[in-house]
Image (cartoon, grey):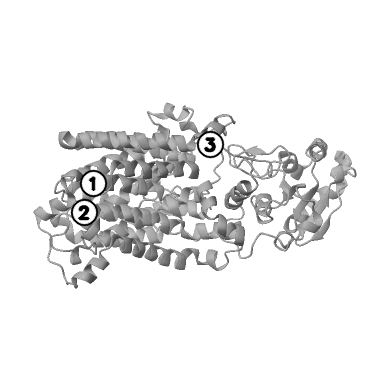
Amino acid sequence: MISQDDGGLGADSALRVDGAEAKDALGDHAGLEADPALQLAVDEPAFTLPAARRSWLASPVLQGAAALGIYLAVWVSLVTRRLLLHASQAQLLQKSPDPNFYVWSLRWWPYAVAHGLNPLYSHEIAAPTGHALAWITTTSPLALLTAPLTLTAGPVVSFNLLEAVALPVSGWAAFVLCRRLTGKFWPALVGGAVFGFSAYEMSHNGAGQINLTYSLLVPLLAYFMVVWWQGSISARTFVIVAALAIAAQFFLFLETFADLTAFLALALVLGLVLAGRQYRAEVLRLTRLSAVAYLIALVLVAPYLAYALTTTPPKPAKITAMDLASLVVPQLGRTFRISWLTSAAAGPRPVSAGCYVGIPLLVLVLVLAVTGWSSRIVRFLTAILPIIIVASLGPVLYVERHREGKLPWAPLFHLPLVRNSYPSRLMLFAFLALAVATALFLANPARRVAWLRWPLAVLVLAAIALNVPALPLVRHTTVPAFISTGQYQEQLAPNEIVVVVSDVGNAGMLWQAESGFYMRVAGGFLNAGVSHRTDLPRPVQNLSHATPTRVARFEAFLRASKIGAIVLDARRAPAWAGIFAKIGLTGHSVGGVVVYPVNGCQACRSLDWAQLRGKKTAAA
C-alpha cells in the first residue's frame, strides 16, 4: 500500500517504482487506477539510503509523529508559548464570555460524573432554577479527556493546554489524510498546514472556542474512508471507527456534526456521479457502510438526543455568513498597504475572519484543476470546493460588507435546523478540500508545471504565516486572590447563591469552576441563543442604568432568587459601589473583591428619582 513502504520523503527522494508497480501498489480495489495525481514518483532519487534506514524513515507512524512535532514546535514557539508558560492563569480574551465558559465546561463534566449528577442539566448556574445544557456546547469529549489534569491542576490549566495545541493536532489529522493519499511527507506536511493553520482555525482559536478548533475528527473520518477504499481495513473495522468518530463529533459540537452529515451526503452523491460504471458499486458500498456507521453513532448518542428533544432549543442564530471578499482579504495590518485590501479588511467585523484563503492557494487549486483534470479525485475536489464556498455565503451575497442581494436558496435558511447554523462555518470543509488539493499538486504535478509546485507552496505558507493573528492575552490572571487562595470559604457558605459582577466575561462561571463549584452562581452566559447579552441576570444588568422601577425589580430578584451575596470585582467597584450603597447594601473588601452580604435584602430600601440623582451612577 502507499502508506506502508513508499518512502514519502518528497519527489526528490522517493523510491523508484515503474508504472506497473505503481498501479499494483494502489491496487485494483483502490479504484484509482494509475491516477497521475496519486502515483508514486518515478524519477531517480537524488540520494540513496541503506534499506533499513530507508524503511525506518518511511514509517507512516514516524512521519506522523514528525509532522505533529513540527507543527507543535512552530505554533507553540511563535504563538501560544505564553499560554503554556503561564498555564494556570486565565488570560485569553477575557472580555469575551467564550473562553471562561469552556473553562467552566472542562470542570463541569468531571464534577457532574463524580457526584452522580445529570451532566445535561446544571443547578450550579442560572441559580436557583439552573439550566439545561443539552443544546449548549460543553465539549464533553475534551472535558473527559483532560479530567485527570483538570482535577489535579485546575480547569484553567486544561483550557490553556487545549488552546495551545489545538491547531497542530488538527493539522496533524489533515496530514495523516494527505500522507495516505500521496505517500509523500513534504506535500502532506504542507497540506496539513493548510487545514490546521487555516483562517478558520486561527480565528476560532483566538476566540477561545475549543469546540471549533478541535476539527481533527473531520479529516480522520475521511482517512478511514480512504484506507477502507484501498483495502487496508475491513468493512467491519471501518464501520466501528467511523461510528465512534461521528458520535464523538456529535458530543464535541452538534453544529459541526450536522454540517459533516450534509457534507458527507454531498460528497457521496458527487462520488457516484464521478465514479463511472467501473467504481460505482464501490461508492454505493461505501455509502451503505457510512449509513450503518451513522445508525450506530445515533444509538450511541440516543440518550443525549432524547433528552435534548425534551428541552427548549436556543433561539435561531443571527445568520453569520461569509463575505465573498474574505476569500482574498487578509486581516487588517497584513494587507501590504494595498488600498482596496486595507479598506475591505477595516471595520469592527473584518470580512476575512475565519474565511481567508489567499490568492496563492486559489491559484494552486486552479492550476491543479487545469493540469490534473484526468484524475477523478481532482475532478471531485474541483466540483465540491465551489459548492462549499457558495453554501458558505448563506442566504444573502455580501461583498466587502455591502449587501448585493438575496441568493436563490435563501428560503432554505429558514428551515428549523438550518436557521440555527452559521453558514461561514462550512468553510471548515473547504479548507479540508484545499489541504488535499495542495498535497496532491505538490506530490505529483503535471510535468509542464512541475517547476511551479514549490514556489507556489512557499507562497501558500507565506500567506498563512502573514495572516497569523496575535492571541489576545492579558498580562495577569483575571482570577482574584479571593478565589485562588480559598478566601471564599471564609466569606461564603457552601452552595450559597451569589451574583458575580465583573467586566471579565463569564467571571462567575470562571470563579465557580476554579473553586470546584463551591458556590452557585445566578446568571452565566451560555450562548447567544439563550443568554441575554451578558453573564449577569437581567435585573442586575439593568441596574447599571438605574431607575426606581429597576431598583425595585433588582430587590425583588434578590429575594426571589435567594441570593446570599454579591461579589463585586474590585476593578468594577467605582461603577457599582455607589448604587449598592444607595440601595442599602454594605460591602467589605477581601482578596481583590468586594463582598456584599444580602441577608434577604433586609436592609434594602426603595429609591425615587431624587435619591437616584443625588449622585450619578456610572454605567457598567
Tag 2–tag 1 contact (CB < 8 Å): yes
Circle nearer the N terminus (3, 2): 2
- Quadrant for the N terminus, please: bottom left
Q: Position of residue 380 (x, y in %)?
A: 25, 41
Q: Is residue 31 in view from this perspective?
A: no
Kind of residue at badge 3? Tyr
Query: Callout 1, which amino acid?
Result: Gly
383 horizontally vs 430: left or right:
left
Q: Secondary structure at mark 2?
A: loop
Query: Distance from label 3 to label 1 (Cα)?
Result: 34 Å
Sort mark 2 into few (<14), some (14-19) or many (20+) by Cα contacts within 10 Å. some
**Disc 1: CA contacts within 10 A as few (<14), some (14-19) or many (>=20):** some
Q: Which residue has dot 3 on it?
A: 304
The reply, left or right, for residue 220 in relation to residue 333 is left
- Quarter holding residue 541: top right
Looking at the image, tell me whether mark 2 or mark 1 is earlier in sequence order.
2
Residue placed at 47% from the left, 52% from the top? 203
The residue identified by callout 2 is 1
Question: Which is more toward the observer, 460 or 113?
Answer: 113
Residue that label 1 marks: 231
